[in-house]
Amino acid sequence: MSQEEWVTGKIGLRINDAPVEFELTVPATPVKPQRMLPIFQAMANSFVEVGVNVAEAEGRSVSCKAGCGACCRQPVPISEVEVYQIAELVEAMDEPRRSEVLQRFQDAAEHFHKIGWYERFEEHQKKAPEMTFDEGYPEGMKLVMEYFNEGIPCPFLENESCSIHQQRPVACREYLVTSPSDNCSRPSAEGVRMVELPAKPSRGLTKLVSSFGGQLVGFPVLSRALELAQENPEDFRSRSGPEWIKEFLDKLVV
């Protein structure tokens, strides 16, 4: 791609009194949202850095580290664009790793279909917009804890560490704690203290893509990504980089 097909600009935001600045180089021509994902990931990293700096200023330090994979047994929420990114990532793997990861995805999906978890979770997401917080939150947390208690690790978890750390979903980037890492094996509101972020880019990304060609209900769960990518051919619209950024930021601050 030639130089004139890119555009660079600076963005300054204040969200909940926290300043966040970006210098972005994005495609000037229309592209699918997959091409923008590395940029959204970098923006998420910047929000995380703000949250970590605030925590450290308060005397707290992040306890997450390689080898601590308790959180990788949660139903990780991903956006629709990340469904296809994950499918492409697995497809590009060399053998025998590709077959091993495919089998992990298949085993996880079969397990949660067998106990009806995906179906009950999708039904909850359909009802959630019409429910009050006091109605929807307890039901949602019950489903999250049911998934966690099944003990099925993320298909990318190897030796209790993320094997796709550089390409991990945005929601995974946002999940950091300052409480003892052992507490994550027995998660509770009292025992796990999250790093608070000025905004959650994962939510903006989910809203962004579902507005342009989205076909899935609510947000997908990572362990179901390959199944969903196969069942739902990608049909996203193309927009220029600046248009994607504007739309993303608009949805981020809503």
Image (cartoon, grey):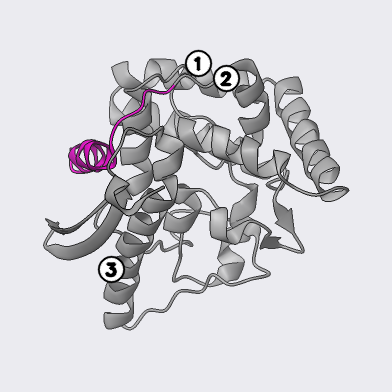
Work out whether residue 196 can be spotted: no
Quarter where residue 163 is shown: bottom right
- Residue 211, percent from left and from top: 31, 23
Residue kind at label 2, given as amino acid type: Arg
Amino acid tagged 3 = Val
State which quadrant residue 70 falls in. bottom right
Q: Quadrant of the C terminus?
A: top left
Q: How far apart are marks 2 and 1 (CA)?
A: 5 Å
Spot occupied by residue 135 in the image (x, y as percentages of width and height): 35, 25
- Asked if disc 2 and disc 1 are in contact, CB closer than 8 Å, the reply is yes
What amino acid is at disc 1?
Glu
- Which residues lie in the magenta part? 236-254
Q: Mark 3 points at which residue?
A: 50
Q: What is the crowding at mark 1: few (fewer than 14 residues within 10 Å), some, or many (at least 20)?
A: few
Q: Which residue is located at x 37 percent, y 79 percent?
A: 60
Q: For mark 2, what is the residue?
A: 120
146 inside magenta stretch: no
Task: Answer with left or right where residue 39 lies relative to residue 72.
Answer: left
- Contact? badges 3 and 2 (CB < 8 Å): no
Name the residue beneath numbered marker 1. 123
Query: In the depicted view, which residue is nearer to us: 211 or 217?
Result: 211
Residue nearest the viewer, comparing 172 with 121: 172
Rendered view: 107 above or below 45: above
